[in-house]
Amino acid sequence: MTEVRDVVVIGGGQAGLAVGYFLRRAGVDFVVLDDQPGPGGAWRHCWDSLRLFSPAEYSPLPGWWMPRQPGEEFPTAEHVAGYLAAYEQRYDLPVRRPVRVRGVHDAGAWLAVQTDQGAWRARIVISATGTWGTPHLPSYPGQELFAGRQLHTTDYRSPQEFAGQRVVVVGGGNSAAQILAEVSTVAATTWVTRRAPRFMPDDVDGRVLFDVATQREAARRAGLPDNGGTRSLGDIVMLPAVRDARDRGVLRAEPMFGRLTEGGVGWDGVRELDCDAIIWCTGFRPDLGHLAPLGLEVDNGVVPTEGTRCLQEPRLHLLGYGDWTGWAAATLVGASRIAKTTAAAIAEELQRDEAAG
């Protein structure tokens, strides 16, 4: 049996919930399909100590501020997941789970959404699946020879499993710095990056980053020169644990190795380093496999859009993947702002279609 909705939202994380809030307010008939067994999106899978860059009051979804976490200035991933679960319930959002979307197809006047729990037809589909499901693991010579453990950010949970080991952490972003900071308290660590890491000033956190990103977007709309936005400040936010690692002398990065060996990693055919584990903090790609049946042209994981609307398939919107779907789109507050304009545009389009008969 095929169910019919005006809008099908694929993904029940922060972006999906934010747009659901505004669709509900606009009176749109919609459903959110989420492949997770419970609420919380990607936050339910993050490592134990992961924290937001901002206090709770600077990271809200629309309509309801995130409550403060007792004893914590920067909320943990567990707290954020709990907030998303409560948010979903508070606004009685129509989330179906677990429902895995197998493909979105062109069905004439409709888009057909095929899942493992049946099919839906929709006038408009919003893809909000994020990136956590598609971790990027680069390829290096000898990778299959390494006898130790290799894991991605998505597999990491806590430092205790590496106690007493020799660990190489790869990557020059926030995830690498945070994981390095805590693993280095129990293991001998080596940090490896493709380019020298850029640290933000100690007094910069998510509040400053949000203000800078807002100013950049305003300048862009006014046709003013690009000031670089948050990237002009650096790549790594100096959270307390990262500052502690700096004070312990841990934040010293080695150049990227060129190969893996059976016992570790090697540089320039000469220098080698033995290690027990390699943690690849090497980022993610947009999780867009369900859109393959539409035959969209994808450039390095990016689908050309105007705002969030797909240029090749105007009945499709992409929400929350990165700056190409709106500034700060992958953050809680950024996804909320973009969701508002997306939902308003969709509601207006549906009303025009209904008036036209």
Image: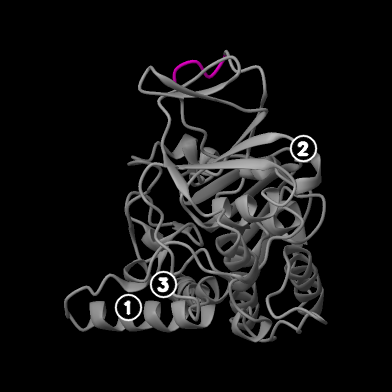
- Tell me the CA gap for discs 3 and 2: 69 Å
Q: Is residue 48 magenta?
A: no
- Callout in the foreground (3, 2): 2
Residue span colored magenta: 140-144
Counting from the top left corner in percent of width and height, residue 320 is at 51, 62
> Of circles 2 and 1, which is in front?
2
User: Toward which corner of the image does residue 101 lie, by quadrant?
Assistant: top right
The kind of residue on which mark 1 rests is: Glu
* Left or right: residue 124 compared with residue 160: left
Q: Which residue is mark 3?
A: 356
What residue would you read off at disc 1? 217
Q: What SS does tag 1 mark?
A: helix
Q: Is residue 39 above or below residue 63?
A: above
Horizontal arrangement in the rendering, residue 63 relative to residue 220 (left or right): right
Q: Which residue is mark 2?
A: 164
Q: Residue 137, image x and y in percent?
A: 52, 33
Taking the spot 33% from the left edge, 83% from the top edge, the residue there is 215
Which numbered disc, 3 or 1, marks the residue closer to the eye? 1
Whole-percent x, y for residue 199 in the image: 43, 64
Q: Visible in this render: residue 104?
A: no
Q: Secondary structure at mark 3?
A: helix
Majority secondary structure of magenta residues: loop
- The answer to whether the residue labelled 3 contacts the one labelled 2, judged by CB atoms less than 8 Å apart, is no
- For the residue pair 317 and 192, the one nearer the viewer reads as 192
Q: Residue sitting at 78 percent across and 64 percent down?
A: 78
Quadrant of the drawing holding the N terminus = top right
Q: Amino acid at mark 2?
A: Gly
Residue depicted at 46% across the width and 82% down the height: 208
